[in-house]
Image: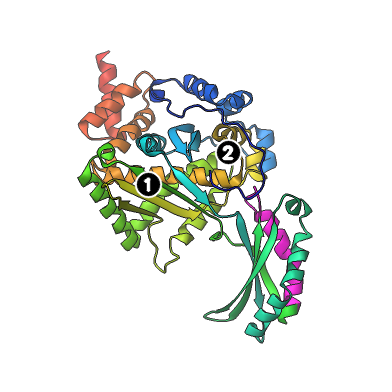
């Protein structure tokens, strides 16, 4: 999955296939056993997956004022091939149809090689805001003249990061002529290795701020990372034959639908939400920061001056769908909930990734799959048909249907074209009266 930023221990890929057909008809325990058979390393994580992995003592150590927990379903997306590797993808989400839709699109890509991904180095940036600078452009040059000394001071804060090949790489100095004041802003660019990087870059920013204040003749105020992680980009692409996804007209309409999202921010907001349905599910499953990834994605969508689509669809020379996605994905494999939450550890094991870059690229591929699924539904049968069929099960359950009643009630609602709680209650009462 792309070039690794640091030397990583190689792990033999155990999964022989992600094509686990018929999973929807299995019981949860049977599904888990099929996944474990493909990824034997999961054997030590099964209890965490079954239980959610978080007891009250562990929860109390993770955040403040703990009074309980909330569970989110953990599913597995199948059929994915990423850079030639069969991979089972952990996804945590409460929304029906997301996992099934991504798996279905991944199946359509298999004959053309699946998803192909790449990424830049895992570079994060901290911002040091300098105020009351009398000569901002002179200060900019003074800071650049002392860049090496400042980088050395930053790197002294994290010797371990330096040992594994990471560390502060560059200073970018910007002068922002704002509405009410002029800011001199120093970006400290740091290679964070397999971490998300917030703690490392924030610590470095705090350390170098006094020296930057002295050089600028001003004072430092904010010293914190930016979630606009535009130096840490991940990319994914795939090709789906027109005949597989619905024919020439469907593909042409899908391209037109994405053009709409490119041109109109109102459409782009919902379009990109569909991408994040896939991305946030993987980020959450692996214990990473969904808010940081979402903030970075949406800020990237406005980089051209207008909020726009993160993805692009085209027709290739044969009339097939060629879909691409590029966005920042600042995720890590060390630190935070990724290391402290047992189910997050299990999810990482399931994905068989060896680096943060691999995880970011896999996540991007899932986002693209989810995006294609949503656009195809919109351009073909309409979004509600497939989504509501799956949503009907939740509605039936919320109306009080028991496990042996849910299928009948949800099927009846879909047949009537009315997936609502009041309809479910009526059907449930009618069914019970007949028994």
Q: Residues within 10 Å of mark 1 (few under 14, many from 20)?
A: many
The quadrant in which residue 346 appears is top right
| In front of the other: 254 or 275 | 254
- Magenta stretch: helix, strand or loop mostly: helix
| Quarter containing the C terminus | top left
Q: Residue at x 62, y 34 (%)?
A: 11
Q: Is residue 97 visible?
A: yes
- The answer to whether 40 appears left or right of 242 in the picture is right
Residue position for label 1: 371
Q: Residue tagged by mark 2?
A: 353
Q: Nearer the viewer, residue 212 or 178?
A: 212
Q: Nearer the viewer, mark 1 or mark 2?
A: 2
Q: Secondary structure at mark 1?
A: helix
Q: Is residue 197 magenta?
A: yes
Q: Is residue 252 above or below residue 206?
A: above
Which is nearer the N-term, disc 1 or disc 2? 2
Q: Is residue 420 visible?
A: no
Between 157 and 326, the one lying in front of the other is 326
Identified at 34% across, 48% down, the residue is 322
Q: Position of residue 280 (x, y in %)?
A: 49, 45
Instruction: Determine if the magenta segment contains residue 58.
Output: no
Q: Residue at x 50, y 20 (%)?
A: 29
Magenta stretch, residue numbers: 192-214
Residue 17 image offset from top left, x and y in percent:
47, 27
């Amino acid at each position: 999955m792309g070039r690794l930023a640091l030397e990583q221990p190689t792990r033999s890929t155990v999964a022989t296939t992600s094509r686990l057909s018929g999973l929807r008809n299995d019981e949860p325990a049977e599904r888990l056993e099929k996944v474990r058979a493909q990824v034997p390393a999961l054997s030590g994580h099964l209890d965490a997956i079954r239980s959610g992995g978080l007891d009250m003592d562990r929860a109390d150590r993770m955040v403040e004022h703990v009074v309980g927990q909330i569970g989110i379903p953990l599913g597995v997306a199948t059929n994915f091939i990423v850079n030639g590797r069969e991979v089972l993808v952990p996804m945590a989400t409460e929304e029906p149809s997301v996992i099934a839709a991504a798996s279905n699109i991944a199946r359509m890509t298999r004959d053309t090689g699946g998803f192909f991904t790449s990424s830049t180095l895992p570079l994060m940036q901290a911002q040091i805001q300098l105020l009351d600078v009398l000569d901002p452009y002179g200060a900019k040059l003074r800071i650049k003249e002392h860049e090496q000394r400042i980088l050395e001071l930053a790197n002294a804060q994290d010797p371990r990061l330096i040992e594994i090949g990471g560390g502060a790489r560059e200073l970018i100095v910007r002068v922002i002529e704002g509405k009410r004041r002029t800011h001199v802003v120093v970006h400290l660019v740091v290679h964070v290795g397999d971490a998300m990087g917030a703690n490392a870059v924030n610590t470095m920013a705090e350390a170098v701020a006094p020296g930057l204040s002295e050089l600028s003749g001003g004072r430092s105020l904010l010293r914190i990372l930016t979630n606009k992680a535009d130096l840490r980009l991940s990319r994914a692409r795939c090709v789906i034959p027109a005949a597989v996804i619905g024919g020439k007209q469907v593909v042409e309409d899908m391209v037109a639908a994405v053009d709409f999202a490119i041109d109109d921010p109102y459409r782009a907001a919902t379009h990109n939400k569909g991408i994040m349905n896939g991305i946030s599910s993987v980020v959450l499953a692996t214990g990473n920061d969904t808010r940081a990834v979402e903030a970075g994605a949406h800020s990237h969508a406005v980089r051209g001056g207008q909020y726009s689509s993160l993805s692009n669809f085209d027709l290739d020379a044969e009339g097939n769908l060629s879909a691409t996605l590029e966005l920042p994905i600042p995720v890590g494999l060390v630190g935070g909930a990724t290391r402290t939450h047992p189910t997050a550890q299990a999810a990482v094991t399931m994905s068989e990734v060896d680096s943060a870059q691999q995880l970011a690229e896999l996540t991007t591929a899932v986002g693209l799959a989810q995006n294609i699924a949503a656009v195809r539904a919109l351009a073909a049968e309409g979004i509600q048909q497939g989504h509501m069929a799956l949503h009907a099960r939740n509605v039936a359950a919320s109306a009080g249907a028991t496990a042996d009643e849910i299928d009948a009630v949800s099927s009846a609602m879909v047949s009537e074209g009315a997936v609502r709680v009041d309809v479910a209650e009526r059907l449930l009462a009618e069914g019970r009266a007949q028994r």
